[in-house]
Image (tube, helix red, strand yellow):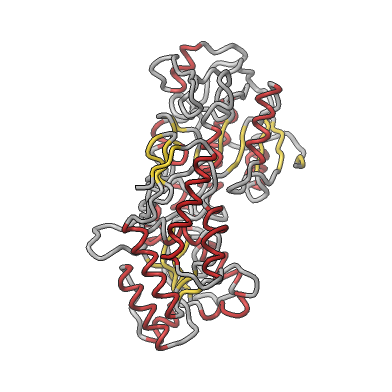
Amino acid sequence: MRSSGSPTTGRRRTGPGLRTAAIALSLATAAVLTGCASADTTTDSPSAAAAFEPVTQQEGSQITVWTDSTRLPSVEAYQKANPDVKMDIVTYDGGADGSTYLQSKVQLFDRTGSGWPDVVFGSPTDVTWASEPTTADAQPFAAPLDGDLVPQSTLDGFAKGSLTPCEFNDHTYCLRNDIAQVVLWYNKDLMDKWGYDVPTTWEEYEALGKQVAEDHPGYLVGSVGDTNSHESYFWSGQCPAFEVTEPDTLRTDLQDPNCTNMAGLLDGLIDAGAVTTKGFFSQGFAQDSGSKVLMAYGPSWYGQYLFKTAFETPAGQIAAASPLKWEGQSTAATGNVGGGVWMVSSHSANLKASTDLVTWLTTSDENQASAPTYPAYTQAAEAWLANPANSDYFANDVSGPFKEAASEVWTGWSNTRFSDATAWSSVVLPALTEGKTLTSTLEAWETEISNEAKAEGYQVVNE
């Protein structure tokens, strides 16, 4: 980690906050802050809610902010606009999904009784442990933000389901910075030239993929070779691979028809040569095959970071379409491939300044309009879509598909205490490289997920 230096900070968009400072908040106030019905929340099990008991608040005290390098300019902009807010900004690389750096540091701070940052940027996976006490006499690292810290009207402004990874034990422990809803990307120039209609269902996608393989060998409609490909396809297909049904119970049933149907569809396209088992981001792929990607089912950031940056596809060719659905379904479901969260520490002595910061970072049009990825806050997303930098590259108006998909992310694929990428990368991708089918790997994939879940304390249900 390295400190970015100066202690200042930024303009507040909304400021519910706490109106008292330099006093010890009573348990009654704590109950209001958390919305708890009673103080009897200390638990024997680490998954149950622990009482949130704020430390003595110190008005105007410095807050320490841990951020990744991507979000650093936003934090610095807030600091510059609010010089009266004292901040110590630290950049760290522990916000990546699957990293245990932040968790290890918090466990150390819990043991020593000091050192916690006031505000942290992390992945949704981090919230699964940050919302739980590390020991029986500790309180969760993340402060519950519902109640007096963040108004319900603000929470209601986030895209449908986007705060689900923040919600544990009937409380909201983070604010979602951005989402990566999955849409259908396609090369409009080639689709028009070849007379193909953009598919709206999985069945149409499958048929078109096989037609492309026959008419234009070498051209692709997708990839399953990246470490997050399963989030685009199996999450969108509502496959219950990571479904937390109770706080300590995980359902992973890859023999569910939603899983086997998606695996079978992809196997057929892989066999036809229309879907590759090489990753879009694998070494050499952009140079060898980037120009032959006719369609790609993937996150909203694919447009800028896959087609524009990696494949260097000229402007005005790539378009986005709505998420696919199975024939007979009234609405689509889609996956989410990324997106970060902001958390406020329950140990913060300046909850007001900390909450004001994370609220501005996630909801401010001023900040989010120029953000690198799609904001989770609905109003800020409108500002982001209105920014020509986020739209001029594309061959169509992506705002419709983006907004539609943002409200259709399936919440049955849960964030867990372990990364959903590990089993896919360690079991499925090597099998595909060896020429095995996705269908044939489902059992081994499920076993690996189950083993990882059990190691993290989950009871596992495989049906």
On screen, 240 above or below 184? above
In front of the other: 181 or 404? 181
Above or below for 196 versus 463: below
Q: Residue 226 location in percent, x, y?
A: 55, 64
> Visible in this render: residue 187?
no
Residue nearer the viewer, 366 or 56:
56
Q: Which residue is drawn at 48% across and 73% down?
A: 318
- Identify the residue at horizontal 56%, vertical 47% (top origin): 367
Percent x, y of residue 337: 49, 55
Query: Is 95 in front, or is 87?
Result: 95
Name the image quarter holding the N terminus. Answer: top right
Q: Using residue 82 as the reference point, say whether residue 266 is left or right of it.
A: left
- The x, y position of residue 208, in whole percent, is 35, 78
Q: Residue 265's x, y, as percent?
A: 37, 69
Q: Is residue 150 above or below residue 336?
A: above
Q: Can residue 199 be seen in this view?
A: yes
Residue drawn at x 46%, y 41% as measured from the top left: 165
Which residue is drawn at the image coordinates 50% and 74% (left, top)?
A: 276
Instruction: Please tell me in which quadrant of the rendered image residue 430 appears.
Output: bottom right
